[in-house]
Amino acid sequence: MNNVATGFPILTLLTVLPLVGAAIALFSGRHARIVAIFTTLVCLVLSLFIWSHLPADGGYGFVERVAWAPSLGVEYHLGVDGLGGLMLVLSSIVTLMSIDASHRVHHMPGLFFSLVLMLEAGLFGSFTALNFFHWFLFWELSLIPAFFLIKLWGGPRRGPAATQFFIYTMAGSVALLLSFLAIFLSTTGKDTPGTMDFVNLTAMAASGQLTQMVTAHLGPVMPWLTIGVLAGFAVKVPLMPFHTWLPNAYAEAPSPVTMLLTGAMSKMGVYGLLRIAIPLFGVQIAAMRTPLLVLATATVVMGAWAAAAQTDLKRVFAYSSVNHLGYCLLAIFALAVPASGAAQQASQAAALNGVILQMFNHGLTAAAVFWFISMIQLRSGGLRGIADFGGLRKPAPVLAGLMGIALFSSLGLPGLNGFAGEFLIFRGVFPLSWVSATVSVLGLLVTAIVILTVIQKVFSGPVSDRWVAFPDLHQGERMALAPVIGLMFLVGLVPQLILNTVNPTVQNLLAHWRF
């Protein structure tokens, strides 16, 4: 892979900046939100600069590489390609949306916004690190503030939800750590230290050397190491049946935190599959392809059916999030097959482009939907049951209209950002695994039914006397939402704004993966 280095450590600056903002916000009291907004705006500008200056060949740009602990195979190695760069932009946007939605946080605001900025730093570090040791530090860093944000500001069952979230994610992290310790020991020679560098390990895996070294040192354990790595990422995405923590965490977390969980943190799992699991364990994942496709298809279909069974708006879209990320898993496991011709290579490229675009689109849309739910809760005294409302379109037409756009984006309506990613995924998956794609279409159908039902029961029909004076969006809320809604249309109508930068990275990744 082509590495483009720059003299200025902009990736380090991007990662450290939220930590500095967190330290300031912690002691800023009621001004902490202003500090957080300013910090995240600067991060967004830096992220957009990085995105707009990525290498045209899809390789790593803004590379930083410094020896850290050479005897342990640890070095400070950063770099981003189209995948990492897009996730930096998404993390900045979603964090800014979350902070904007947190204007009603009056209990320990300094600590709240400090934890949000720490979480943002964890996201940036995870999406830029190219060494496992460094990457794992930030992977775990994001877990700690998320736990406390749920535990201290969540709903009535926030304690069990936060504990379940922490235990599940920590168990996945342990599985990841054990697998990489085995790889490190296997790559350690008499005179050479082991390596935990993603670029080096990817090259070793592509040549078959990694499997040979692991087998020589530990025996035929590569399938077990693969399962450990997959389990770590499956919890984060999540893949059924590792999803049971998610509905409780999303429902009990305050809505601004739910926006972060679904909009950015869940993408860490998909990113890990693309950056670590597939490049290093592609042959083993290809051997497990059928059961993995079954689980991905179940995630798509059962996630949609579970959403249809819910009566709480947050739980509806918590399960809907499982369904939408299931499309990413479906495409990733479907493309894990040796390419036998130009047509199959094109299908793999379409599927992978769809995954990366879907990561961005789902993050933006899901965060917006939970933002709207937060606005409904604030106006209704905390109510969020589907049956609690009806006819809100009459007293609050702007709220109904803008939330309707976000919901139709989630549904995948052509012209909005949700369509392009799902279309590319199914365009790629159908030739690679038509059975899985055909069954997964049921998920699209049920999702449409779920979203249309929410629109009908919440916004349509007669308005009850209780909601005749339901407040519409005020001017500040409309201005805050305008860029988000505009971005949904922009990406939906001109997806090449993202795909032109992502596609070279897709071609570069596929060229270095071995199945």
Image (cartoon, rainbow, N blue to C red):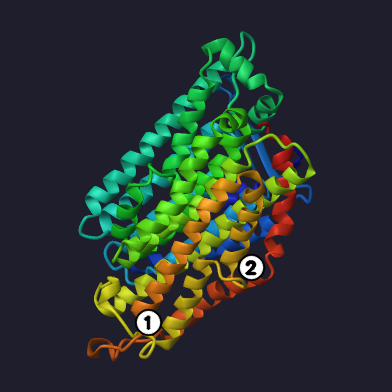
Q: Is 57 above or below relative to 30?
A: above
Q: Is residue 2 left or right of residue 448?
A: right
- Which residue is labeled 1 in the image? 459
Where, by quadrant of the figure, is residue 304 drawn?
bottom left
From where the camera sits, is residue 272 visible? yes
The three-letter code of the residue at mark 2 reads: Val
Determine which of the numbered discs, if any, sits on residue 4 in the image: none
Residue at (48%, 24%) from the top-left corner?
224
The three-letter code of the residue at mark 1 reads: Phe
From where the camera sits, is residue 25 visible? no
Q: x and y percent of residue 255 in the render?
A: 35, 64
Question: At numbered mark 1, what does the secondary structure look like: helix, strand or loop?
Answer: helix
- Which residue is labeled 2 in the image? 491
Could you classify mark 1 by the number of other residues whose Cα lies within 10 Å: few (under 14), some (14-19), or many (20 or more)? many
N-terminal-most mark, 1 or 2: 1
Residue at (55%, 66%) from the top-left corner?
412
Residue at (41%, 42%) from the top-left corner?
235
